Image (cartoon, helix red, strand yellow):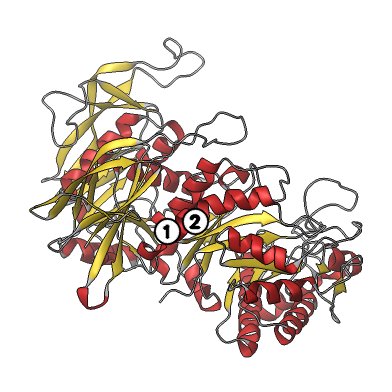
């Protein structure tokens, strides 16, 4: 049963000690009424901020020098009086006051520098404190003080992370020696950092729950995607009551970020919260208001991916919420409130499992991230229901597995996939995916190929001929460029060659070139680019990474056709443009079983500005066809939240209908 409020605000309050009259204009009743009027039912409020200032009369830390009231206590009391939950924010690694007073608590990078903002820099940044020093005791004492003084709905611990690959302060060097770890080895530094972080989280969760057993607990700035379940979030899930994905699309995260991470965190068995911001750019962007259509899109997409909603705001130092901001938030949250009955306890459905090619950090770009974003965009544009899987995921829940571009099949993964295929599963893989850990040969006989090595030509070409086959249907016969270097493979007996490779006259060098870019030879090379062996289809090129980088439509169409041949009856068929999004969730209905809730979205982020994508206009779609493989005989199909019945037909495995209008977002319910 859901414990998460669905309409939350995360209220930043990082306030310089140099500012006078902090909270001088704060009125607790006005504060709570403003939130209530915007349909907010939970607000994260501050015990302590990145400046290291406390907003209550602390005996442990430093109360903001100009604060004349118990701001935290008054906020909690007013919110609870109006039926609003008030989880409490506690900064961890970023702390200006503690870093200045105790430089011996600072994190130290491998090159001997103190981590974070340099002393005389006015640029963005904060001093980083180490959780392996007495600073951890300081944070614990502050947390205990808050837990003793106030009714705690939850604790949000922010910036729980260590500089990469690890800290080498005197405390960390000492404990690494005790653990037998070598601080000159990055992997061992990372291992130690993970140990310190998880020990801290275990301590804080136990502390909070010793006072408030039902309080929500979350640690921010840790989210990552990792095929190794022990190194990733699965290995520390016991410290969290739920997941929150901080993802402000215009603030550096981008519109690919939230759905990418949500597709993994859906699989980990905890409730999920999506966090965007009301800002035009990012945190603390006072005067920057997000377009209403953008905020709608971000919140509706959270619902569509099985998450509750949180919108970030920042309280002005004088303590009044901005009415215009809460008019905006309320305009969205009243719509979310109407949708909520069809979203609580709804579980995303998936037919495709995507194996991760490597770790993807919450903060940094990488080839693995590009591969996964390309896979996500391609599958989303085709309307497939999918999730990202680590190496501990249960494979049998999916009809098709995709191993994009660089997923090594070491043990025990290779054995698990072999067993999955033996029981009727299907596999689509590309480039170096499927190779053994040493990269010399494919790990499974079922792939039906011998690995030769890296392809000698880049670019190469999909040599599409007539008549079309299952992979090339709808694609005009010609040579289609593949911009990135792939692999050379040789088919074994019984492996079908679906698309051959064509090559350029030569790789471009200072003396070998033709025209401005590249020119194909007018015949195939004799090597395959796409093959099929039983229920395994292989692309010899990094088609998913290339789709993320180049967005070439033919890559999507070739992969779509390949998936269709392995998965002929997808969960959903929706007549949406490629910019549309469709998701399917199941909601328990007691003795009646379940109902299915299909979310249709059509918003179009555009790169109108050099820094960010803009969502401004809502363009309605009309008469959208929809077919859902329901798994039961439908007795009613209707629009939600309007509760308007739709005519429908039961056609084989599918319930089909026509949605009269999709104006940004529309739910269709099948009971």
* Residue at the (31%, 67%) spot, across then down: 587
**Residue 620, image x and y in percent?**
37, 36
Residue 75 position (above or below residue 451): below
Q: Are marks 2 and 1 in contact (CB under 8 Å)?
A: yes
Where residue 63 sits in the image (x, y, percent)? 86, 72
Answer with left or right where residue 114 lies relative to residue 506.
right
Residue with the mark numbered 1: 338
Circle 2 residue: 334
- Is 188 left, or right, of 101 in this rendering? left
Q: For the residue labelled by badge 1, is the local secondary structure a helix, a strand or a loop?
A: helix
Would you say 182 lies left or right of 94 here? left
Per the image, label 2 sits on a secondary structure element best described as helix
Q: Nearer the viewer, residue 310 or 95?
A: 310
Name the image quarter holding residue 217. Answer: bottom right
Residue nearest the viewer, comparing 636 with 315? 636
User: Horizontal placement of 383 versus 546: left or right?
Assistant: left
Residue 199 horizontal/vertical position (percent): 63, 79
Camera-side residue: 581 or 26? 26
For this orientation, the residue located farthest to the left is: 652
Of residue 605 and residue 320, the one placed in the foreground of this image is 320
Answer whether residue 415 is visible to the viewer in this image. Answer: no
Q: Position of residue 614 (x, y in %)?
A: 54, 35
In this rendering, is residue 482 above or below 91?
Answer: above
Q: Is residue 625 above or below residue 141?
A: above
């Amino acid at each position: 049963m859901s414990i998460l409020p669905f309409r939350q605000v995360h209220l930043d309050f990082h306030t310089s000690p140099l500012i006078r009259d902090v909270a001088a204009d704060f009125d607790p009743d006005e504060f709570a009424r403003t939130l209530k009027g915007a349909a907010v039912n939970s607000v994260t409020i501050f015990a302590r901020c990145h400046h290291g200032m406390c907003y209550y009369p602390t005996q442990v830390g430093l109360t903001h020098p100009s604060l004349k009231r118990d701001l935290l206590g008054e906020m909690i009391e007013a919110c609870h009086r109006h039926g609003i939950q008030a989880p409490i924010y506690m900064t961890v690694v970023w702390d200006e006051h503690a870093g200045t007073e105790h430089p011996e608590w600072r994190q130290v990078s491998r090159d001997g520098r103190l981590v974070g903002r340099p002393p005389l820099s006015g640029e963005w940044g904060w001093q980083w404190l180490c959780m392996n020093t007495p600073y951890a005791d300081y944070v614990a004492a502050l947390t205990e003080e808050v837990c003793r003084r106030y009714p705690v709905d939850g604790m949000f611990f922010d910036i729980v992370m260590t500089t990469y690959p690890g800290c080498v302060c005197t405390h960390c060097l000492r404990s690494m020696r005790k653990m037998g770890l070598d601080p000159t080895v990055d992997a061992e530094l990372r291992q130690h950092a993970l140990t310190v972080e998880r020990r801290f989280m275990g301590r804080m969760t136990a502390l909070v729950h010793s006072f408030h057993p039902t309080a929500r607990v979350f640690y921010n700035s840790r989210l990552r995607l990792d095929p190794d379940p022990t190194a990733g979030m699965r290995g520390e899930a016991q410290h969290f009551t739920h997941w929150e994905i901080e993802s402000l699309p215009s603030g550096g995260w981008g519109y690919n970020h939230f759905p990418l991470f949500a597709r993994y965190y859906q699989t980990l068995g905890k409730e999920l919260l999506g966090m965007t911001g009301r800002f035009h750019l990012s945190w603390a962007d006072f005067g920057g208001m997000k377009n209403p259509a953008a905020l709608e899109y971000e919140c509706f997409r959270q619902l569509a991916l099985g998450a509750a909603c949180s919108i970030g705001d920042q309280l002005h130092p004088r303590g009044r919420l901005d009415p215009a901001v809460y008019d905006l938030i309320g305009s969205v949250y009243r719509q979310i409130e109407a949708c909520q009955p069809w979203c609580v306890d709804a579980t995303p459905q998936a037919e495709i499992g995507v194996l991760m090619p490597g770790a993807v950090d919450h903060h940094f770009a990488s080839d693995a991230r590009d591969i996964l974003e390309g896979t996500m965009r391609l599958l989303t544009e085709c309307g497939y229901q999918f999730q990202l899987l680590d190496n501990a995921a249960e494979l049998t829940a999916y009809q098709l597995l995709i191993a994009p571009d660089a997923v090594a099949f070491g043990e025990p993964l290779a054995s698990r996939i072999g067993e999955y295929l033996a029981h009727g599963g299907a596999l689509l893989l590309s480039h170096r995916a499927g190779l053994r850990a040493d990269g010399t040969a494919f790990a499974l006989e079922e792939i039906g190929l011998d690995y030769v090595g890296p392809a000698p030509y880049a670019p190469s070409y999909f040599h599409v001929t007539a008549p079309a086959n299952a992979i090339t249907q709808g694609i005009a016969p010609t040579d289609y460029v593949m911009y990135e270097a792939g692999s050379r493979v040789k088919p074994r007996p019984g492996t079908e060659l679906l698309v051959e490779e064509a090559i350029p006259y030569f790789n471009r060098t200072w003396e070998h070139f033709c025209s401005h870019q590249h020119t194909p030879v007018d015949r195939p090379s004799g090597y395959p680019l796409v093959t099929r062996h039983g229920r395994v289809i292989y692309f010899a090129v990094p088609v998913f990474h290339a789709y993320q980088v180049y967005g070439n439509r033919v890559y999507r169409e070739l992969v779509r056709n390949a998936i269709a041949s392995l998965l002929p009856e997808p969960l959903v068929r929706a007549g949406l443009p490629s910019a549309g999004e469709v998701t399917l969730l199941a909601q328990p209905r007691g003795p009646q079983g379940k109902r299915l809730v299909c979310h249709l979205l059509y918003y179009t982020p555009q790169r109108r500005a050099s820094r960010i994508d803009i969502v401004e206009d809502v363009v309605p779609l009309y008469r959208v066809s929809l077919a859902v493989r329901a798994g039961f005989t439908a007795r009613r199909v209707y629009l939600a939240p309007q509760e308007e019945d739709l005519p429908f037909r039961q056609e084989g495995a599918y319930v089909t209908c026509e949605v009269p209008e999709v104006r940004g977002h529309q739910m269709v319910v099948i009971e």
